[in-house]
Image (cartoon, helix red, strand yellow):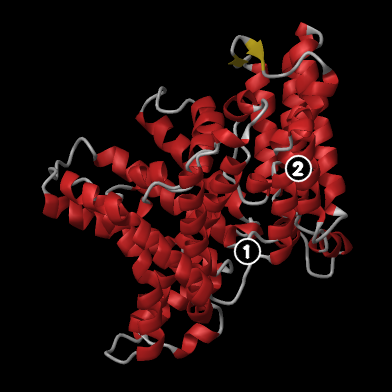
Amino acid sequence: MLFNSLVFAELLFITFVLYYQKWLLKYQVLILIIASLVFYAYTNPALLILLLFSAGINVASSYYVAYGNAANRKLIATAGVVFNLTVLAFFKYSPLIAKSLFPETSSVGEFLLTIPLPIGISFYTFEGISLLVDVYKEKKDDDKSLANSSFKEHAGRTLFFISFFPHLVSGPILKAHDFLPQIKAKFLKDINWEQCFKNLILGYFLKMVVADNLKDFTFWIAFPYFQRYTAITLITMLFGYSCQIFADFAGYSLIAIGLAQLFGYNLINNFNFPYISSSIQEFWKRWHISLSSFLMEYLYFPLGGNRKGKVRTYINLMITMFLGGLWHGAAWSYAVWGLVHGSALAIERMFKDKIKLGSYKVVVFFKRILVFCLVTFAWLFFKLPDFSQVIIYLKKIATTISLTFYPALCFNILLYSSPVFLYHLVYLLKKNKKFEASFNKYSYILYAIMLFLIVTNSGSSGSFIYFQF
């Protein structure tokens, strides 16, 4: 079920009305659980079985980590984490395993290729791991365990945490110690309506006006269509895809945040103007923040982080980003994408103390351009998961350098990419207090324009890019 569909609007309206009825206040969590399960099961009801099974295992294992035999806590927590990773590997990486380890005529390989990819599995699996690790580490909610002493209450809270529909299929990835303490009675008077509407309008604008229009022009990056274009058009399409993937995913995250706020819950801000980053390290503090913080807290730090010497730090960075790349999809190109970012992070750390470039505005400007170009180049591994096609695309750029290009295609890409650049530019300009005051005073005009464009100039409806991950 898409956030930009009529059936979702109907589900949201019914859920919202029931949620704030005074006589149903004590059933608020149950109402959201039911709405979330309907939301998830709408397209493929059979996949609901896997979600409930996964949630059930995490409920039982986290409860017994908290209240079972102390001597078995580590064993149960480890088994729960292994279960989550096994389920993720089976459903998400079976095609990759089949192609890498089995011949095309193998019956095992053919079976692995038929296994479906349940939507949202990467997200709710990580949240199950977060719950187990947080309970094992005894992270507290106001000096109380994150696992409620009542198994029934713990089961309800855990199912709600994992299935809450705004974040269920594409994040932001929630951490148990951030979300579970928020579960309590919510009241209509406490909603910050202005902030909700701003997040929803901006989110829907980025998705429906920017990303959905750009997708019709960046479509030609797909193989074999890109082979008929010359370097200028190929590069323009790639930069357009960079803006598209930002608008699509940041738009989804803003919608999710706005929807959660309607029900009294605060989700992590998943994007913080990433394309103004002057280093890859800064980029990962601004891009998909819920994933980068998850990988840092639950993978990079347990590996040793930067506490075991320089060489081990570089290795830890590479491992973290390699696995972060594979998390995105069952193709080696995603792993290469992770290694590109891991290598960039390691090189930055290696030379940051040896090369002093200063903080002059012109230096920062060129560093931002360089980082944006590197990040944009790396998105090619997302658009073309077959690594051989990436090579062909890059060769095509290198061998067709000329002034020839497709004006209409390039113009439309630049037109629909411009809001992404303006979005980041406004953020930079708001550092000037006078500009910020003027902007805030008249920002309602901008939101009115975005709302008008959502109604009049939305692109053809399409699923969110991160649904495939």
125 to 329, vertically: above or below? above
Identity of the residue drawn at 18% across and 38% down: 354
187 relative to 436, above or below: above
Q: Residues within 10 Å of mark 2 (few under 14, many from 20)?
A: some
The answer to whether any part of residue 10 appears in the image is yes
In the image, what residue occupies the spot 78% across and 23% down?
Answer: 154
Mark 1 is surrounded, within 10 Å at the Cα level, by few (under 14), some (14 to 19) or many (20 or more) other residues, namely some
Q: Where residue 302 appears, x then y in whole percent?
A: 54, 26
Q: Position of residue 381 (x, y in %)?
A: 51, 64
Dot 2 corresponds to which residue? 18
Going by the image, does 413 lie left or right of 182? left
**Which of 458/140 is in front?**
458
* 2 or 1: mark nearer the eye: 2
Three-letter amino acid code at disc 1? Asn
Please report the residue visible at 14 percent of the width from the left and 45 percent of the height from the top: 357
Label tally: 2
| x and y percentages locating residue 434 in the rendered image | 16, 47
Task: From the viewer's side, name the closer residue of 310 and 159.
Answer: 159
* Mark 2, secondary structure of its residue: helix
Using the image, determine if residue 160 lies above or below residue 185: below
Secondary structure found at label 1: loop
Q: Quadrant of the N terminus?
A: bottom right
In primary-sequence order, the first of circles 2 and 1 is: 1
Does residue 210 show up? no
**Three-letter amino acid code at disc 2?**
Leu
- Position of 263 with respect to 433 (left or right) is right
Give x and y (percent) for residue 8: 71, 59
Instruction: Name which residue lies at 56% across and 84% down.
Output: 224
Out of 215 and 86, give the one closest to the viewer: 215
Location of the C terminus by quadrant is bottom right
| Residue for badge 1 | 4
Q: CA distance from mark 2 to mark 1?
A: 21 Å
